[in-house]
């Protein structure tokens, strides 16, 4: 039959699109990605609004036992729900490819992701360089810092995504991420923009030097941060609204 990849947006059960909601309600089985990100609501809130029972899909199910999802999609309508946009994470591209190889029909319903929503800060999206993630297990890891240096050389902004572990309810903070970069060699006077709760009515935004940001308190999750490159005067003006 069909495997639907449906984006849920960034904050809660109400961020799903009308089209996405209509598709979910027509599906026989509904899975929710439960490791790349999360919504700030309980799964029961999703089930109440969507009118469907939802099965949590952890990393093991999606990456190692995906045939369970694909086999169901061969004979029924299956929804695979993803926080943000379905294909912001490469893991979901892999699931799509595996399903296509099994001749399963694929349909996609897009939604907002951090890669587009971060534009609200005022930094121009086309001036962002490569996006990078900072993992919990980062001893001897240099890639995020190297990505930043490469972007800086090209005068591009850098967006840092922060690790999370939903099963153990662990979330990396902006403070942890910036401190990691300082340990890698980031100058402590580097301007940083820390963000929590993108997609909420009142996202948490703190702007300052790296040495200042690591002392600030962030309470909303998920979190990320940006190190801006050279800014156009309009970018500086809009970013200044959040100070």
Image (tube, rainbow, N blue to C red):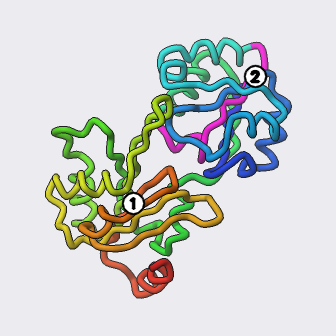
> Toward which corner of the image does residue 164 lie, by quadrant?
top left
Mark identifier at residue 225: 1
The answer to whether the residues at label 2 and label 1 have Cβ atoms under 8 Å apart is no
x, y (%) of residue 151?
A: 28, 61
Question: Is-magenta flag for residue 81?
Answer: yes
**Looking at the image, is mark 2 or mark 1 earlier in the sequence?**
2
Identify the element where label 1 is drawn.
Answer: strand
Q: Residue placed at 77% from the left, 20% from the top?
A: 1
| Location of mark 2 (residue) | 29
Mark 2, Cα crowd under 10 Å, few <14 / some 14-19 / many 20+, is many
x, y (%) of residue 209?
A: 28, 72
- Residue 156 visible in image: no
Q: Residue placed at 66% from the left, 35% from the top?
A: 81
Which of label 2 and label 1 is nearer to you? 1
Q: Which residues are magenta?
A: 75-89
Q: Residue placed at 65% from the left, 64% from the top?
A: 201
């Amino acid at each position: 039959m069909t495997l639907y990849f449906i984006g849920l947006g960034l904050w809660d059960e109400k961020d799903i699109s009308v089209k996405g909601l209509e598709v979910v309600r027509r599906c026989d089985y509904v899975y929710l990605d439960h490791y790349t990100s999360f919504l700030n609501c309980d799964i029961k809130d999703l089930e109440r609004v969507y009118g469907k029972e939802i099965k949590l899909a952890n990393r093991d199910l999606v990456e190692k036992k995906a045939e369970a999802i694909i086999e169901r999609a061969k004979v029924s309508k299956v929804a695979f729900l993803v926080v943000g946009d379905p294909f912001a994470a490469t893991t979901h591209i892999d699931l799509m490819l595996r399903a296509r190889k099994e001749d399963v029909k694929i349909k996609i319903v897009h939604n907002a992701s951090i890669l587009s929503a971060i534009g609200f800060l005022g930094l121009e999206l086309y001036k962002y360089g490569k996006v990078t993630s900072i993992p919990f297990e980062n001893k001897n890891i240099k890639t995020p810092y190297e990505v930043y240096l490469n972007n800086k050389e090209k005068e591009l902004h850098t967006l840092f995504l922060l690790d999370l572990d939903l099963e153990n309810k662990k979330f990396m903070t902006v403070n942890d991420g910036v401190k990691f970069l300082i340990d890698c060699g980031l100058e402590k006077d580097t301007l940083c923009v820390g963000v929590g709760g993108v997609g909420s009515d009142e996202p948490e935004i703190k702007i300052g030097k790296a040495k200042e940001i690591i002392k600030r308190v962030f309470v909303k999750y998920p979190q990320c941060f940006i190190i801006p490159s050279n800014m156009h005067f309009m970018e500086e003006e809009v970013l200044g609204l959040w100070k």
